[in-house]
Image (spheres, helix red, strand yellow):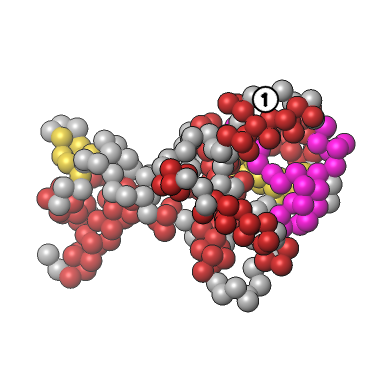
């Protein structure tokens, strides 16, 4: 085998590995036939045979008599770097999330939606932590209810009742953040490939979260009063989305709020 052919074999192997890492090819999936891949890549069948044979020897794929080659065994850990977008076409939201968390505190972080420390109830937080430190040991070391702190859920149930929303403490689930809540909803409601509508522009973490769930993300133009209702209705008819995720108030990153009129129109369509 000459050097050029050896390089082509390595490229074919790298392509197959990347497609498996990105979940384009899952365990048990059939690989393109030797003839199809050779014609598609404009390379010799011998090169594809050599690449497939090497991958089979490594246990990445497995041959099946009179059937072809298939992805073998268990999937490798999901590499978010492999599933990210081409950076010459759009900004990777996972990269933005990481930069926001790792950047120094004195740097500007537009679009993060984090309140300045001076806006936070520091005194109340310190008082609550001191009270917790004096609690019984079980409160510090044992697991609590998966629904969250019972007294807080009882308080929220009373508050909701004041707004005419009947809910018992057992129907309320506390989460660490809004992103945590959206992630739980996505785990419960979405399957890979489902379409989700988001605003354009939208909170970058929505895109990062939906990319991790392998959803198809479709953007709706956002105005100063909410989504463009006509575009929203058109996308509903075409895309049949499973969810629409938005910031109803103090929209990130525009700062706008959804008007009651637009919200009513969105619900109707």
x then y, percent, for residue 146: 48, 35
Q: Residue furthest right?
A: 261
Which residue is found at the position 71% from the left and 46% from the top?
Answer: 247
Residue 243 appears in the rendering: no
Which residue is found at the position 60% from the left and 73% from the top?
Answer: 105
> Crowding near pointer 1: few (<14 within 10 Å), some, many (20+)?
some
Residue 108 image-quadrant placement: bottom right
Q: Nearer the viewer, residue 220 or 109?
A: 109
| Quarter the N terminus occupies | bottom left
x then y, percent, for residue 72: 21, 41
Which residue is found at the position 32% from the left and 40% from the top?
Answer: 26
Q: Nearer the viewer, residue 5 or 135?
A: 135
Q: Is residue 126 above or below residue 249?
A: below
x then y, percent, for residue 15: 31, 55
Q: Which residue is mark 1?
A: 167
Q: Is residue 232 left or right of residue 30?
A: right
Q: Magenta segment: does it hold 145? A: no
Q: Is residue 66 above or below residue 108?
A: above
Instruction: Look at the image and give the residue range highlighted in magenta.
Output: 239-265
Q: Is residue 146 above or below residue 170?
A: below
Q: Is residue 266 left or right of residue 191?
A: right
Residue 36 image-quadrant placement: top left
| Quarter the C terminus occupies | top right
**SS for dot 1:** loop
Which residue is found at the position 61% from the left and 31% from the top?
Answer: 172
Q: Is residue 29 left or right of residue 147?
A: left
Residue 165 appears in the rendering: yes
Q: Is residue 68 left or right of residue 87?
A: left
């Amino acid at each position: 085998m000459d050097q050029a052919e050896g390089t082509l074999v390595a490229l074919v192997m790298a392509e197959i590995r990347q497609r498996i890492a990105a979940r384009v090819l899952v365990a048990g999936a059939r690989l393109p036939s030797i003839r199809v891949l050779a014609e598609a890549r404009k390379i010799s069948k011998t090169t594809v045979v050599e690449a497939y044979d090497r991958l089979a020897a490594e246990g990445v794929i497995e041959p099946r008599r009179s059937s072809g080659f298939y992805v073998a065994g268990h999937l490798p850990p999901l590499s978010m770097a492999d599933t990210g977008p081409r950076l010459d076409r759009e900004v990777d939201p996972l990269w933005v999330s990481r930069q926001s968390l790792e950047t120094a505190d004195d740097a500007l972080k537009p679009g993060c939606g984090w309140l300045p420390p001076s806006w936070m109830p520091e005194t109340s937080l310190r008082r609550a932590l001191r009270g917790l430190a004096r609690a019984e040991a079980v409160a510090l070391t044992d697991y609590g209810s998966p629904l969250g702190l019972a007294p807080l859920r009882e308080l929220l149930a009373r508050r909701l009742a004041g707004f005419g929303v009947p809910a018992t403490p057992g129907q309320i689930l506390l989460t660490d953040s809004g992103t945590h809540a959206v992630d739980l909803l996505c785990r419960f409601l979405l399957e890979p490939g489902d379409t989700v509508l988001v605003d354009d522009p939208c909170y970058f973490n929505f895109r990062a979260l939906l990319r991790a769930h392998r959803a198809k993300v479709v953007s709706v133009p956002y105005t100063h009063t909410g989504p463009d209702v006509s575009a929203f209705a058109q996308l509903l008819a075409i895309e049949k989305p499973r969810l629409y995720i938005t910031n109803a108030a103090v929209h990130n990153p525009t700062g706008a709020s959804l008007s009651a009129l637009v919200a009513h129109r969105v619900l109707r369509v």
